[in-house]
Image (cartoon, rainbow, N blue to C red):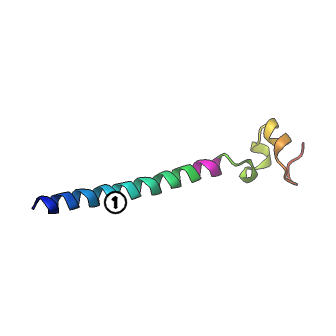
């Protein structure tokens, strides 16, 4: 009976760990995409981003 309880706890821990890793991966990917100046409209870029972004539609 104790072995069954331990195996259930280990299984729950593994599932929670995998869910946490997947959530963290999605969260960090979303933040990277939000901070990517290559995906922004030219009028939304700061002057620094305009100077350091190599895009044909951004006027410096």
Q: Of residues 9 and 30, which is closer to you in this image?
A: 9
Q: Nearer the viewer, residue 11 or 29?
A: 11
Q: Is residue 26 left or right of residue 47?
A: left
Percent position of residue 20, x then y: 41, 53
The residue wearing badge 1 is 15
Does the segment drawn in magenta span residue 50? no
Q: Which residues are magenta?
A: 30-34
The local secondary structure at tag 1 comes to helix
Q: Quadrant of the C terminus?
A: top right
Principal SS element in the magenta part?
helix
Q: Residue furthest front?
A: 3
Residue under the point 38% across and 54% down = 17
- Please say if 19 is above or below 34: below
**Where is residue 58 shown, x and y percent of the image?**
85, 48
Q: Nearer the viewer, residue 31 or 46?
A: 31
The answer to whether residue 50 is left or right of residue 44 is: right
**Residue 45, percent from left and from top:** 77, 42
**Side (left or right) of 45 relative to 16:** right
Q: Residues within 10 Å of mark 1 (few under 14, many from 20)?
A: few
The answer to which quarter of the image holds residue 16 is: bottom left
Q: Nearer the viewer, residue 19 or 60?
A: 19
Instruction: State the residue at coordinates (79%, 44%).
Output: 43
């Amino acid at each position: 009976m104790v072995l069954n309880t331990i195996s259930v706890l280990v299984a729950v821990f593994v599932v929670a760990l995998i869910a946490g890793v997947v959530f963290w991966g999605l969260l960090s990917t979303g933040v990277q995409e939000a901070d990517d100046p290559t995906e922004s409209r030219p009028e939304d870029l700061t002057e620094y981003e305009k100077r350091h972004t190599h895009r044909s539609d951004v006027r410096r």
